[in-house]
Image (cartoon, helix red, strand yellow):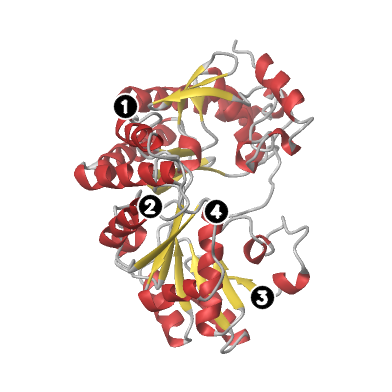
Amino acid sequence: MRHFDRSEAMLARTENVIPLGSQTFSKSRTQFPVGVSPLYLDRGNGSHVWDVDGNEYVDFISSLCSVTLGYGDSDVDGAVRDQLDRGVILSLPAPLEAEVAELICEMVPCAEKVRFGKNGSDATSGAIRIARAFTGRDHVAVCGYHGWQDWYIGTTARNRGVPQATRDLSHPFMYNDLASLERVFAEWPGQIAAVILEPMNVEYPAPGFLEGVRELATRHGAILVFDETITGFRYANGGAQELFGVTPDLATFGKGLANGYPVSAVAGRADVMQMMEEVFFSFTFGGELLSLAAAKATLEKLKREPVVARIGAIGEELKASVRSVIDETQTAHVFDIKGHPSWSFLTIADQPGATSFAIKTWLMQEWHQRGILSYGTHNLNLSHSEADIAALLDTYRALFPQLRDLLAAGKLIEALRCPPLEPLFKVR
């Protein structure tokens, strides 16, 4: 049996100086059950990672979808090494800023001008700020997950520290439910500055949904923002807007932009983006050159090679195989497989005597023993091999019948070697 002694010792040490022992909620003990999980990783290569205890895993998290090509991609890391000799950041802008912006404008349908940040939250918050400045309005309609800033996170259960006055300006609507967006416009007539949504996450857009959102935003004078932090440069080279043929006014990018290096972007209509000269959206490290070198190399590789097509093909085969395993093991009452092939979700339904989070905890407990790092999504990258996919499917074939029998016998909770995970807040 695998042990995680060094991980647990590192958690105890780190929590003395870092709240939760992690910089990112999704990488913390809130998402990985303590006692049965690796909690700290030492290194990654391709599609594999190694924890601080020396255990090896096939990684289906891909650093929260930020790694598109694989850990240690030679083209990207080579470009970063070359740039390191010329400087990490300089006292005036470098040509790389224009070069990467030009690539984005070439690849993304809505992009006429671009500004860079470091995290997805920088980009989404920048988009909302210029939408408010451009329209002279304050209210925002939101759908999906858009980061940690007050204007969005105040709409979730994780809203401590967000002033009520800020929370009152953001209004959630439901994906694939145009009527819910129409109600927001009706309740706040002439006051909605922006409609921001993930163009797709778990579910595909229903026929006419994205087109309907586009029409409603235009009719009511609101700026339409696609949060393509994950879908950008993953669903298609031009993002979900290219895949689905609906062009927003603004779009935000991050995770797929630089194969794990920290850079994000706001891109869109020139007249709206011009508001960046009026609002304050400025970062000391906004033009940091190692990340821009990584972005340039990543985007050029996407243009040069069929990266997105290959990831999509692997993902289609994976989704079909997972459906077959669900059918073969008679676990359709527990599992389903949803989402885009490059970012698919093994969804779990509550069962008598066991919540979906208890089931997920047991699965993670067993996945980690078998060398699979996952929390239920398949975040594929170019380096995932047929052998990696086969290892995942073999694990599903072994575990789904065991789970089915544990649930039928009412013994799932007894089989846990740790407390079950609990939900933080629903983001999608």
- Name the one closer to the observer, 403 or 33: 33
Q: Which mark is residue 169?
A: 3
For this orientation, the residue located farthest to the front is 91
Residue 102 position by quadrant: bottom left
Q: Which mark is residue 385?
A: 1
Q: In 3D space, how far apart are the residues under numbered discs 2 and 4 (Cα atoms)?
A: 13 Å
Q: Are marks 2 and 4 in contact (CB under 8 Å)?
A: no
Of pointers 3 and 4, the one earlier in the residue sequence: 3
Q: In 3D space, how far apart are the residues under numbered discs 4 and 1 (Cα atoms)?
A: 39 Å
Label 2 sits on a secondary structure element that is loop
Of pointers 2 and 4, the one earlier in the residue sequence: 2
- Name the one closer to the observer, 73 or 37: 73
Read off the residue under disc 2.
94
Q: In 3D space, how far apart are the residues under numbered discs 1 and 2 (Cα atoms)?
A: 37 Å
- The amino acid on which the numbered mark 4 sits, given as a three-letter code, is Thr
Question: Which label sits in the foreground, 1 or 2?
Answer: 2
Residue 420 position by quadrant: top right
Q: Residue at x 72, y 24 (%)?
A: 414
Read off the residue under disc 4.
284
Task: Give the x, y percent position of residue 291.
Answer: 43, 44
Label 1 crowding class (10 Å Cα cut-off): few <14, some 14-19, many 20+?
A: some
Question: Which label sits in the foreground, 3 or 4?
Answer: 4
- The amino acid on which the numbered mark 3 sits, given as a three-letter code, is Leu
Vertical relation: 324 (above or below) 275: above
Q: Residue at x 38, y 34 (%)?
A: 85
- Name the one closer to the observer, 116 or 83: 83
Q: Which mark is residue 251?
A: none
Label 2 crowding class (10 Å Cα cut-off): few <14, some 14-19, many 20+?
A: some
